[in-house]
Image (cartoon, rainbow, N blue to C red):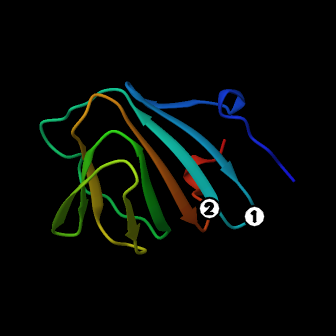
Amino acid sequence: MSTLKYDQIDVTTVRQGVERRMGYTNNLMMTVMDFHNGPAAQPDPLHSHPHEQITYVAEGEINFILGEESTHLKPGDMVLVPSEMPHSIQLLTQHVRLVDCFTPLRQDFLP
């Protein structure tokens, strides 16, 4: 069994105001994304990837754009993102914490 304590997980600065912590097994990855740079006037650009993704809103509020649909999400809400589906977020609060699960692993996130 592996246990990761939040304050002991390595932090990666993705860009100014955005931090990522992660844990993973052979086939599954979970990241905790902290955004400290909201609210945003516009959504981030759409992107897609071959990984299936589940996003859980732990703190803050966002608009989640999935394809051509935008949904206001708050703590406790989730969104399921199929492989290759264009998606994005727009921060609605100053701080947002998202928990993302991916399969297969996001090799581009690994050190």
Q: Secondary structure at mark 1?
A: loop
- Which of pointers 1 and 2 lies earlier in the amino acid sequence? 1
The answer to which image quadrant residue 95 occupies is top left
Where 42 sits versus 53, above or below? above
Residue drawn 22% across the image and 69% down it: 67
Left or right of residue 50, residue 110 in this image: right
Q: Residues within 10 Å of mark 1 (few under 14, many from 20)?
A: few
In this view, which residue lies farthest toward the right?
A: 1
- Outermost residue toward the front? 76
- In the rendered structure, the answer to whether residue 25 lies left or right of residue 70 reads right
Residue 96 percent location from the top left of the image: 36, 37
Q: Which residue is mark 2?
A: 105
Where does label 1 land, which residue?
26
Decide: few, some or many residues near mark 2? Use Cα within 10 Å; few <14, some 14-19, many ≥20. some
Residue 88, x across and y down, in percent: 28, 54
Q: What residue is shown at x 59% (from left), y 53% (from top)? A: 30
